[in-house]
Image (tube, grey):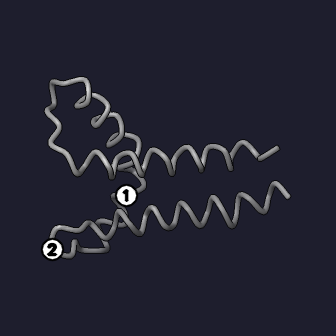
Amino acid sequence: MHHPLYTLGVIYLLILVLRAVLSWFPVHSGSPLGTVNHWLRVVTEPVVAPFRRVIPPLGMFDVSYMVALLVVWVLTNYVLYRVTI
């Protein structure tokens, strides 16, 4: 059985990936998908924003988002997973 923080980390990683996938498609703010997109931004922006302030985008790629995803993945898989062993 995994520690609840590990499970939350995995869920948060899925939310980050879902936000990334939705960013590839045009989403209108009044649509149901627009509501989901807004919710995903509200939940993920507190983690992504600090990286974005430090790391500038490279062309059309938001590298800060990829760094945030990597940091959450490392914390989840190497730190929180170790707590459960």
Depth check, front residue: 68 or 28: 28
The mark that comes first in sequence, 2 or 1, is: 1
Q: Secondary structure at mark 2?
A: loop
Give me the C-alpha separation between circle 2 and circle 1: 18 Å
Question: Percent from the top left, x then y, of residue 17?
Answer: 41, 51
Q: Hey, what amino acid is under mark 2?
A: Gly
Q: Is residue 29 left or right of residue 40?
A: left
Q: Which residue is mark 2?
A: 59
Kindly give the residue lying farthest to the right in the view shown: 85
Q: Residues within 10 Å of mark 1 (few under 14, many from 20)?
A: some
Question: Percent from the top left, x then y, of residue 78?
Answer: 68, 67
Q: Is residue 85 left or right of residue 79?
A: right
Res. 54 image quadrant:
bottom left
Question: Percent from the top left, x then y, of residue 75?
Answer: 61, 63
Q: Is residue 37 above or below residue 85?
A: above
Q: Which residue is mark 1?
A: 48
Depth check, front residue: 72 or 23: 23
Q: Residues within 10 Å of mark 2 (few under 14, many from 20)?
A: few
